Amino acid sequence: MPLTHTRDLFAKALKEKYALGAFNVNNMELLQAIVEACEEEKAPVMLQISKGARQYANPVYLKKLIEAAISLTNIPIAVHLDHGDSFELCKECIDEGFTSVMIDGSHLPFDKNVEVCRRVVEYAHKHNCVVEGELGQLVGAQFDEGEAGGGFSKGGHYTHPEEAVAFVKASGVDSLAVAIGNSHGAYKFRGAQHLDLDRLKAIKKTLLDAGLGDYPLVLHGASSVPKELAEEINRYGGKLGEDTAGVPEADIEVARRVGCTKVNIDTDLRLAMTAAIRKALFENPKEFDPRKYLGPARARVKELVRHKVKNVLCCAGHAFD
Ligand code: G3H
Ligand code: 13P
Ligand code: ZN
């Protein structure tokens, strides 16, 4: 079965109001865990590959591994470039057949961000690929505290609803990653853990009112950083800080219902894999066969992905709609 287009996955997800899990792939075990979990849960899936993953694993290995996965399953799979940082990298991935790319110009001034997105969109649309842009910065909740008080102030790190409309119209991007207090990694919040879900609702509604329809939004930094995984890592020799924190799964559920069509998860997979490897090596210090610790790691990631697609993203059961 060939790749399923990101555009088609988005259309179905928007219609049925579930979110697509976009899971990062860096090696064979992660890929197998994600695809097997989604196959068992009958969930469509987006595999996303970062610049770092391409450097680590080599684009050809990744392509061949994904081809193998596709040949072994019949669930819909799309392949996406995560955080593309240049037109050239996006072009490379479009030419390789990715069904979507992200051009991340979120660190640039508004006009420059529009400019680089526009350039990628023009190339992508000619080559049957769709584009994710990002407006606002994923610096975490502590940077914009108080901003959401009365109305939504402009000029902070968070995405402003009217600017989102202007950005989508000017850049032509097909989906938009928003900054609503989300951030990457295992230390997302100081103090209260929350996303600015009112802002998310306002962004979605303002896009609708502006004639952009049921426009797909993307939530980066959506790992929930389970305490039990952090504790397990530390129990078996890790040294994660006390202050690990992620997005509560209840917030992700609200974000899904409000209209986050693609939800990016990487850190939770890293934590699951690391916890299982540390445990296996600690309990069997004489072991040196990588299959004996990578096998349990793969199983742990699979269990986590099954939980996400079934209980949080609600895309389980939708593979063959
Ligand atoms: O948002 C970033 C993803 O977690 C990918 O991370 O650039 O270290 O591969 P990476
Ligand atoms: P996490 O670090 O929360 O897993 O976010 C991953 C992500 O946004 C990839 O683009
Ligand atoms: Zn991200």
Image (cartoon, rainbow, N blue to C red):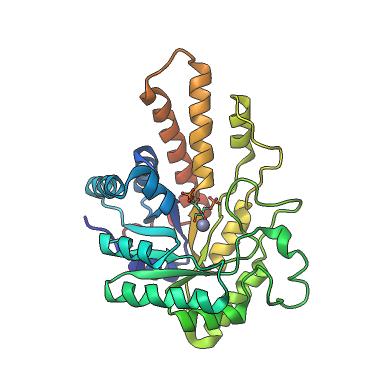
Position above or below: 140 against 35: below
Q: Splitting the image into 4 quarters, where does residue 306 fall?
A: top left
Q: Is residue 173 left or right of residue 125?
A: right
The N terminus: image quadrant: bottom left
Q: Quadrant of residue 195?
A: bottom right
Residue 200 x/y as whole percent: 61, 70
Q: Looking at this view, is 168 or 304 the one in front?
A: 168
Task: Work out whether residue 95 or residue 165 is closer to the camera in this orientation and state it.
Answer: 95
Q: Residue at x 24, y 45 (%)?
A: 68
Can residue 38 be seen here? The reply is yes
Residue that appears at 34% across and 39% down:
28
> If the image is split into quadrants, where does the C terminus sit?
bottom left
State the residue at coordinates (26%, 52%): 74
Residue 72 falls left or right of residue 261: left
Q: Quadrant of residue 165?
A: bottom right
Of 314 and 190, the residue lying toward us: 190
x and y percentages locating residue 283 in the rendered image: 52, 17
Q: Which residue does the image show at 65% across and 66% down from the upper left? A: 197
Residue 191 percent location from the top left of the image: 76, 51
Residue 242 appears at what percent x and percent y? 71, 38
Q: Is residue 231 above or below residue 141?
A: above
- Vertical position of residue 237 compared to residue 245: above or below: above
Q: Residue placed farthest to the top in the image?
A: 286
Asked if one can make out residue 41 in the rendered structure from this viewpoint, the answer is: no
